[in-house]
Image (cartoon, rainbow, N blue to C red):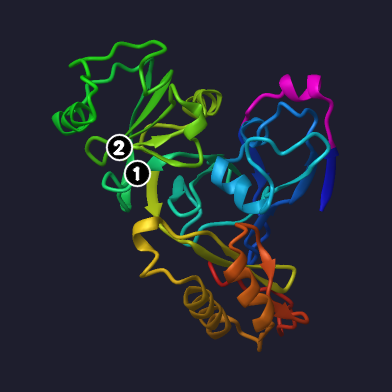
Amino acid sequence: MRKLILLFGALCSLHAAALTLDLPPPGEDLVGEVTTVKVASYEDTINVYAEAYGLGFRQLVAANPGVNPWVPGAGTELVLPLQFILPPGERAGIVINLAEMRLYHYRPDGRTVDTYPIGIGREGWQTPLVAGAKVLNVIKDPTWVPPPSIRADHLAMGHRLPAVVPPGPDNPMGPWAVQLSTRGYYIHGTNKELGIGMRVSAGCIRMYNRDVTEFAHRVAKGTPVRIVNAPVKVGWKQGALYVEVHEALEEQREVHVAEADVADALHQARRLSPVAVEIDWANAKAAAVRKSGMPVRVSVGDAAGTADGHVYAANP
């Protein structure tokens, strides 16, 4: 784990840019590195560090249990969960993991991946699972035309929306919008950046405005898009098996029980492995209970002893 100590002035000048990470070698699944940083000022909230380091609110809270997110306190050491097991499935285009509240954009070069924190749909307005979608358009300064369902929802809460919201500070789509082929859904900026890493939208995917500006300049029309929901991910690094556990979405917690999901995922990884893998079940259970959102090693010894010298991934 790497440590970072920032002066307050340096922190304020940080740019909330994407994490651009090298893809792992064939047969491996982990990217990035967990780091720590000391809170520079008593006035800082966790959101300051979430935005500065490309993290979402809930992600940073989960990695720092017991820390007050609104007053973490000067000198408090924050864990920055900047290591990730890549989502299951093909490593191409855009992959969004709802449970993780994170977007992965695999660059066409096949060597790097950009990853961003996102806000997703709240209960009753869930962001849908999607397979086989694509990017239709990239729009600068989008105009928002709220559909009747959203206007009715706001009206029920005593807020009358206009029929059309032009570009500007009151537009909830922010400075850029990436239109998806799934009808009515966009990846866009926001006029409420506090909601990144939370469930705040009516189904669309929100990004920090500086992130969406960068993303809009990097993504191409026709890029494939998958939206998955994987609260538990497993993967390999240097012959060791890891598990990464996130809190399931509220309405799915009866279906996604962490201990059962972790056990199922690890049994599947063992079945797929060409060599015997011994699991540290105490460590696996601790990861399921903790739900830190960070990769945790759960194998005993080295699983890389294959005849051809390769390490095989559970999530190819």
Q: Position of residue 302 (x, y in %)?
A: 77, 79
Query: Label 1 neighbourhood size at 10 Å, few (<14), some (14-19), many (20+)?
Result: some
- Provide the residue designation for mark 1: 122
Residue at image position (21%, 15%) is 162
199 magenta-colored? no
The quarter of the picture where residue 44 lies is top right
Relative placement, left or right, of 154 versus 259 is left
In terms of secondary structure, where does tag 1 sit? loop
Q: Which residues are magenta?
A: 5-17
Amino acid of disc 1? Arg
Residue 303 visible, this angle: no
Q: Position of residue 238 (x, y in %)?
A: 75, 68
Front position in the image: 150 or 316: 150
Residue at image position (55%, 46%) is 58
- Provide the residue designation for mark 2: 202
Residue 277, compared with residue 242, is above or below; it is below
Amino acid of disc 2? Ala
Q: Which mark is residue 284?
A: none
Residue at image position (80%, 34%) is 74
Q: Position of residue 304 (x, y in %)?
A: 73, 78
Q: How many marks?
A: 2
